[in-house]
Image: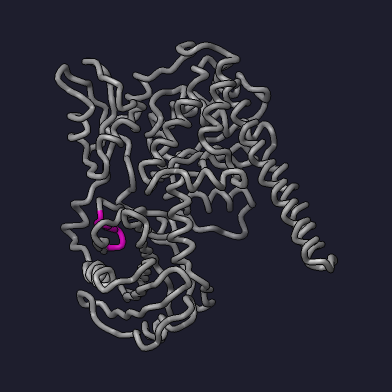
């Protein structure tokens, strides 16, 4: 699977802090405690008897919230693909496009020509040329057979790894050989991304689209990612050379250089007005069927529960868990769903070994809004943990709070956050509606600041308005301009 995502500081920070620290400072999952996703995907089970392509399609739908149904957008995307195919080096290839019901900014392609694009990415794009740049990039991967090449590279790396483990007697020589093979694989992937960028820009230009769409959209992706980045992007840049995707500034520079070979700025079709009209009403952010975060509060109408994170936390609803990070990065949290045998007590579960160094003396049972619960503490080398397990129906919800310096106030805040976990009433659940994009016409007295105040977003509304519309802080709006705002 080849994806459009780029390494960002926000993703790295969450990965290092939450997936590294919370999953979990020297821990292993026990076979009896099967991990399942939170939120639970609505959709497709994977039948092992199906052909491989069908199984992969089913896994993708299960991981990305299923198919996003929107006939108008589907037609726009398919017509865009048709134009790109006609202008490509392989007009004989056939493509099939699926829109994914996910707020993630992502697109990817399978070797069989199945293209996937998330509604989050579609919503971020500001014209058809930007959309075409993404589709053309993924088609470039298919045309260049990158998936097949990556598979062969991975196979060679596996052979070297086996040789290192089973044959070589010198551990230093073996480690060096394996490191070199992995570095080659990573570097080759970066080269593939640049190659797909080049193929995509050329394809878009020949299809009559503005060839600068790729550079604009890559810039928008980075700005969108930076909104989630605590403390800036410096940490991510230091490790980009081993990333499977080039850093965005590199890709923007490369995309600009490619675009200039085909046309000057302003040449080629952007089709902004029609594209924005297609976006009107599209779901923005999480779908309530998968739960969503509004500020510190998380609600999951389908599963019927809600909770509020500690003060200062921002939440991120992923396919695996609800992740939270406090401003400054010194505290983090994770909420996920685990399968625990009914006969196993929650206190025994907390001591079952899925996280090391649990303080047995800290384990206690109690009730939270009528639910059975248990808590304990654990300590790693750099992080201290407060763990909670709650039975909700046949499932167990697991809160994992981490702090670099656990203090009495922070531990109290963790307890108070878990105490907000409760069942949602039917009235509450039915009142939950998704956020949507609304395309509005700018009036004479309206500024970005005024329009941002109309947004149903409390987290950096002005910055999000600017990013969502491809505007800088210095841009001005003219009466009659069409812009995107987020409404409930």
Work out whether 176 lies above or below 282: below
- Left or right for 251, reference 142: left
Could you tell me residue 133's position as x and y percent?
A: 51, 27
Residue sitting at x 33%, y 71%: 406
Numbered disc total: 0
Residue interval drawn in magenta? 296-304
Residue 101 shows in the view: no
**In magenta segment, residue 302:** yes
Across and down, in percent, residue 342 comes to 39, 82
From the viewer's side, name the closer residue of 210 and 117: 210
Question: Could you tell me which quadrant the N terminus lies in?
Answer: top right
Residue at 49% x, 80% y is: 353
Quarter of the figure with residue 254: top right
Q: Is the C terminus in the top left, top right, bottom left or bottom right quadrant?
A: top left
Residue depicted at x 36% and y 68%: 405
Q: Decide: is 363 above or below 67.
A: below
Q: Position of residue 457 (x, y in %)?
A: 24, 42
**Whether residue 230 can be seen here:** yes
User: Coloured how?
Assistant: one colour
């Amino acid at each position: 699977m080849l994806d459009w995502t780029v390494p960002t500081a926000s993703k790295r920070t969450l990965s290092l802090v939450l997936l590294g620290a919370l999953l979990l400072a020297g821990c292993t999952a026990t076979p009896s405690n099967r991990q399942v996703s939170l939120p639970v995907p609505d959709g497709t089970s994977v039948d092992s008897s199906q052909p491989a392509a069908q199984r992969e399609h089913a896994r993708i739908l299960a991981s990305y919230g299923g198919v996003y149904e929107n006939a108008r957008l589907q037609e726009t995307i398919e017509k865009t693909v048709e134009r790109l195919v006609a202008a490509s080096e392989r007009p004989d290839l056939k493509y099939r496009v699926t829109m994914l019901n996910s707020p993630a900014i992502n697109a990817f392609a399978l070797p069989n020509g199945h293209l996937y694009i998330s509604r989050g990415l579609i919503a971020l794009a500001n014209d058809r040329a930007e959309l075409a740049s993404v589709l053309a990039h993924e088609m470039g991967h298919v045309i260049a057979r990158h998936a097949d090449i990556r598979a062969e590279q991975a196979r060679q790396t596996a052979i070297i790894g086996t040789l290192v483990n089973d044959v070589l007697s010198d551990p230093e020589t073996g480690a060096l050989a394996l490191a070199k093979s992995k570095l080659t694989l990573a570097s080759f992937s970066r080269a593939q991304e640049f190659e797909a960028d080049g193929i995509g820009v050329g394809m878009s230009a020949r299809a009559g689209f503005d060839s600068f769409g790729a550079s604009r959209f890559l810039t928008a992706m980075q700005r969108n990612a930076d909104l989630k980045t605590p403390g800036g992007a410096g940490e991510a840049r230091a490790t980009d050379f081993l990333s499977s995707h080039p850093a965005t500034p590199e890709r923007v520079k490369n995309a600009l250089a490619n675009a200039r070979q085909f046309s000057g700025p302003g040449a080629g079709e952007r089709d902004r007005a029609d594209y924005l009209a297609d976006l009107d009403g599209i779901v923005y952010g999480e779908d309530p069927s998968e739960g969503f975060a509004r500020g510190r509060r998380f609600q999951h109408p389908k599963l019927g529960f809600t909770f509020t994170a500690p003060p200062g936390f921002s939440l991120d609803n992923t396919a695996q868990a609800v992740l939270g990070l406090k401003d400054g990065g010194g505290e983090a949290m994770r909420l996920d769903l685990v399968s625990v045998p009914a006969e196993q007590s929650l206190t025994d579960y907390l001591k079952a070994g899925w996280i090391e160094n649990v303080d047995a003396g800290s384990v206690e049972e109690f009730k939270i809004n009528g639910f059975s619960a248990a808590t304990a503490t654990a300590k790693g080398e750099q992080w201290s943990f407060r763990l909670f397990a709650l039975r909700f129906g046949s499932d167990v919800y697991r809160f994992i709070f981490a702090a670099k310096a656990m203090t009495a106030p922070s531990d109290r805040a963790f307890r108070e956050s878990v105490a907000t976990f409760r069942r949602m009433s039917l009235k509450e659940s039915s009142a939950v509606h998704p956020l949507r994009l609304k395309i509005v016409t700018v009036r004479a007295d309206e500024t970005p600041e005024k329009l941002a105040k109309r947004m149903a977003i409390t987290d950096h509304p002005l910055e999000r308005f600017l990013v969502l519309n491809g505007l800088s802080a210095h841009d001005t709006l003219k009466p009659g301009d069409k812009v995107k705002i987020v409404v409930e």
